[in-house]
Image: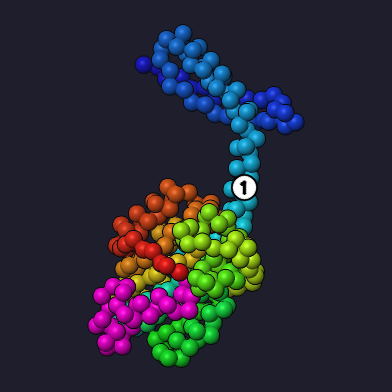
Amino acid sequence: MIFGFFRVAVLLPMVGAHTVQIDETETRLRLSDNDDDNIGLLQTVVDSLGTVASSQESFASRSHARMARSSSRPCTCESENSDWSPPARTHAKCVFIDLGAADGNTFIKFLNSEYGQVSDCLNSGNWEAFLVEANPVFEKELSSLEEQFPGRVHALAGKAAYMCKGETTFFVDNDPTHNYWGSNMEGGKHPPSDWKHPNQLRDHDVVHHGTNVTVPLVNVPQLLYENSISADYTIMKMDVEGAEWDIVPCMSRSQAVKTLDDLHMEVHPATWQIGNTTPAEMEAAQQQLIQKGVSIPKYYSAT
């Protein structure tokens, strides 16, 4: 069997008002030693190129959208940094990292042992919680929890969970009906059909109103690395309205996840992300976390 390889450079003609040029299209053909087969296969390739022109404009449009989405990321993944310092303690505790803490409603569930078997930690007071919430409307409630549990609750209010440090524009949903659940980094204003609770009717005008604020970013791998040790029982709740599509692939490349036991994550539509992670890449990242010992149970939050 002889394997022939052909490189085809193609210059497509005008399509409407657009000149489409493929500078270098490499087509690798596995051919037999039959010359007629070679010619036939090559003709098939040439014929199929005609379909490229008709779809090139829409393809370019989609590509441009993906490039624009990618460039909108406020920073790039930082999964490791030699400047990070792990905790100096050696005694184990329960650590609850709440990403998208809202007013502390899911933290209260943690205190009620709804996020794993933490009753021993709770009864002994040997636990610590980090509450990350970008929506500034919840600062008062989270600060109150920090005062109620001094040294154990750390309120990171007015900060957005992400995969690196920096700052970003954050859309604040003005509708209090469901605890301002539409607030997000992507800029908000998702179409009503794209909301995570489509069965609950919402006022479309309210959905499309909100406020943009600038908030600092919390690097999730760094937060985990600097506040958890292997002996801990570490639980992370992640409900970040689409930012998980950037955070999880970055986490999967971090050694910090060796201290993470459970990840309770609500996965939102891929269109809500500000990056361009594909569903296949997201699935692969979750599998990498599982292989590193992280349990990822099914998770859903009503708010």
Specify whether 90 is left or right of 136: left
Identify the secondary structure beneath mark 1.
helix
Residue at image point 30% right, 57% down? 291
4 to 88, vertically: above or below: above
Between residue 7 and residue 191, name the one nearer to us: 191
Q: Kindly identify which residue carries mark 1.
A: 65
Magenta stretch bounds: 100-127
Say how the picture is coloured: rainbow
The foreground one among 284 and 114 is 114
Residue toward you, 113 or 13? 113
Residue 239, percent from left and from top? 45, 66
Q: Is residue 15 left or right of residue 280?
A: right
Whether residue 163 is visible, yes or no, is no
Residue 124 colored in magenta in the image = yes
* 273 versus 8 height, above or below: below
Hey, what amino acid is under mark 1?
Ala
Q: Position of residue 15 (x, y in %)?
A: 70, 27
Q: In the rendered image, which quarter contains the C terminus?
A: bottom left
Residue 189 visible in the displayed image: yes
For this rendering, which residue is in front, 183 or 200? Answer: 200
Which residue appears at 42% of the width and 67% of the height? 302
Q: Is residue 218 above or below residue 31?
A: below
**x 55%, y 22%: residue:** 48
Q: Is residue 206 left or right of residue 249?
A: right
Q: Where on the picture, by quarter, is residue 139?
A: bottom right
Q: Is residue 107 magenta?
A: yes
Count up the numbered dots. Answer: 1
Report x, y in % for residue 40: 49, 12
Q: Residues within 10 Å of mark 1 (few under 14, many from 20)?
A: few
Q: Residue at x 48, y 88 (%)?
A: 144
